[in-house]
Image (tube, rainbow, N blue to C red):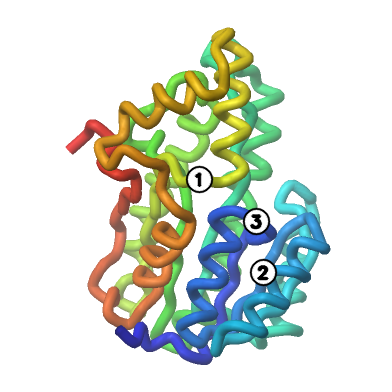
Amino acid sequence: MDFGIADKKAVVLASSRGLGAGIAEALAREGAHVLLCGRTEDRLATNCKVINETTPGKADYVVADIAAESFVEDLLSAIKAKLGGADILVNNSGGPTPGTVAEMNPEKLDGFFRSMVAPIITLTNALVPQMKEKGWGRIVTVASSGVVEPIPNLALSNTLRSALVGWNKTLSSEVASSGITANMLLPGRIHTDRIDELDHANAERSGRSLAEVRKATLSTIPAGRLGRVEEFASIAAFLCSRQASYLTGSLIRCDGGATHAI
């Protein structure tokens, strides 16, 4: 299926590895010109090299830390210089440290809000006007299945990512008449470095082996396995397609059936 996004300009946050890198490659396979963004230059450069050598699209990158005060300003400058504008925005960020509600405090909340919520809202607000001018735009925000069914020991993530759910739904209503869609994509257990980090933390906290933790995890997933990055990225690419023009304000789960909520 041709997603109709060849030559569209796409910005993918936190795309030096994991889900963001996978989404950037999936969009480039549809012919998009993708701007990757992250903190690790060697990974970004490698990802761009792979994309430019193996896909019909094109990739550039910018080194930028979403937690930095100048992040939005720096990224907007890079978007203008390397893309000339943005038709597609994929909001993505790393997760906060694991922990319980009792371990949350104002300093942690404020710090992670500034790196997981505020930059996403500010950047999106800055790019929406040019999408409105074109009468076309796609905004996909990657969150977590924890916004539907809170995940134990991820209190900060459950709290802060849930804030983006209300924001996204409000945004989708405000921009729909301009040909812009805004959806959230919720990963379950997709096999990335982040999942390995969480499983290691779980093993250390519970006194179990990593193998025991992973076995227990798989037992809760009806599909019986971890998801693959390319599976998740394909859904993200579809949400950016012309075919998805009437799909907006939605929470899309990619979790192998693990989330219990209807």
Q: Is 233 drawn above or below residue 222 in the view shown?
A: below
Q: Secondary structure at mark 1?
A: loop
Q: Amino acid at mark 2?
A: Leu
Q: Amino acid at mark 1?
A: His
Which residue lies at the image location 40% right of the left edge and 67% below the top edge?
Answer: 234
Seen from this angle, which residue lies furthest left?
262
Residue at the spot of label 3: 17
Residue at the spot of label 1: 191
Which residue lies at the image location 75% right of the left edge and 69% below the top edge?
Answer: 46
Residue 187 at what x, y percent from top left? 42, 47
Q: Quadrant of residue 179?
A: bottom left
Residue 172 at what x, y percent from top left? 35, 62
Residue 99 at what x, y percent from top left? 58, 19
Tell how many labels: 3
Residue at the spot of label 2: 36
Q: Foreground mark, 2 or 3?
A: 3
Seen from this angle, which residue lies furthest front?
211
- Mark toward the start of the polypeptide (2 vs 3): 3
For this rendering, which residue is in front, 214 or 15? 214
Q: Mark 2 and mark 3 in contact? Answer it, CB < 8 Å.
A: no
Which residue lies at the image location 72% right of the left edge and 59% below the top edge?
Answer: 38
Q: Secondary structure at mark 2?
A: strand
C-alpha separation, residue under disc 1 versus residue under disc 3: 12 Å
